[in-house]
Image (cartoon, rainbow, N blue to C red):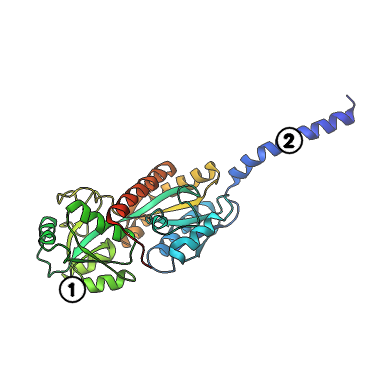
Amino acid sequence: MTKSCYAVMRLLIVGVSMAIAAPSFAQQAYPNKPIRFIVPYPPGGTTTPLAHLVGQKISESWGQPVIVDNRPGGNTFIGTEALVRSANDGYTIMLAAGSLTLVPQLIPAPYDPLKDLAPVATFARTAFILLVNPSVPANNLKELIAHAKSKPGQLNYATPGAGGPQHLAHELLNLAAGIKTQHIPYKGAGPALTDLIGGQVQMYFSTTVTAIPHVKAGKIRAIAISGDSRLPALPQVPTFAQAGLTGLDSQGVWYGVITPAGTPKAVINKMSTEIGKFMAMPDFKEKLLAQGLSLFYSNPEQFAALLNADTASYAKVIKAANIKFEN
């Protein structure tokens, strides 16, 4: 072999080696540019501050900007479809909430949440607390169930809107307790809580942070809370299981990060591991607690199992209660 042929062959070998190694180099370099963090809800509320909190922590750890992009509308379909249509390279992520697999079961969605999305990690959750107006003659869950059974169909429950997690939670309560109560949907949590305090409705599943001030002020009465432990701010309120009713402990809202399906596993694992580290940061925990949230970490595999479980649970309640979406 001539020296010139040898040189050409050597260049070819080096070139092929670099081409083969390029993907791993690219993965090792991730992230090397800004990350877009979609929020499929309008600014305000719980979700946007959470995205900024998680985004700030990621940016501090990785040295790359995380840009929060609110894409509200279409019952979260607009933002989620924007994520699905994005490149699956880890540079577009989205804040997901507990209704991720619920809404597509009530309204035809332009994507499949179990096939078109890749779970990264959950990081927080909030329980639901069952509230009643003080005029309801019940101080605990047993008394409330007995009262509802004595007046079938006469007690009303409020929700921030039809087809949401709180709607499902109330219907699950109806099924588990063997009672019948009437649904009154509102356009948001504020009006629903206002009418509960005013006595226009008798029952309401609320997020904990919203309920606590009114319970402490005596404006409403707390009956039971979902989850597996009592709320430190309201230690007198038992969990549903402690109050004698099973099947509602999993009710509530979780928050997590998802990315388009097909995103490299190494990228997903890197981000998931990073989010897991936030659980040990005191300031991260304090900011969640200030919003009535608790730490709730799950890795990609655990998150996927949660989505599958949610899908099956929602489908069961939707069918049993014949729930229809009302816009």
User: For the point 53% across and 45% down, which residue is it?
Assistant: 267
Pointer 1 residue: 199
Examine the rendering and report whether any part of residue 312 can be seen: yes
Residue 203 coordinates in the image, percent (x, y): 20, 65
Q: What's the amino acid at mark 1? A: Gly
Residue 179 relative to residue 23: left or right? left
Residue 237 coordinates in the image, percent (x, y): 17, 57
Element marked by disc 2: helix
Q: Nearer the viewer, mark 2 or mark 1?
A: 1
Choose the circle earlier in sequence order: 2 or 1: 2
- Judged from this view, the residue extending furthest toward the bottom is 198
User: For the point 33% across and 62% down, which residue is it?
Assistant: 291
- Judged from this view, the residue extending furthest toward the top is 1
Examine the rendering and report whether any part of residue 239 can be seen: no
Image quarter in which the N terminus is found: top right
Q: Quadrant of residue 142?
A: bottom left
Residue 75 coordinates in the image, percent (x, y): 43, 63
Q: Is residue 237 above or below residue 211?
A: above
Q: What's the amino acid at mark 2? A: Val
Residue 221 coordinates in the image, percent (x, y): 16, 65
Between the C-alphas of marks 2 and 1, the distance is 74 Å
User: For the point 40% across and 69% down, which residue is it?
Assistant: 44
User: For the point 31% across and 53% down, which residue is it?
Assistant: 319
Pointer 2 residue: 16
Front residue of 274 and 317: 317
Report the number of discs.
2
Mark 2 burial class by Cα count in 10 Å: few <14, some 14-19, many 20+: few
Element marked by disc 1: loop
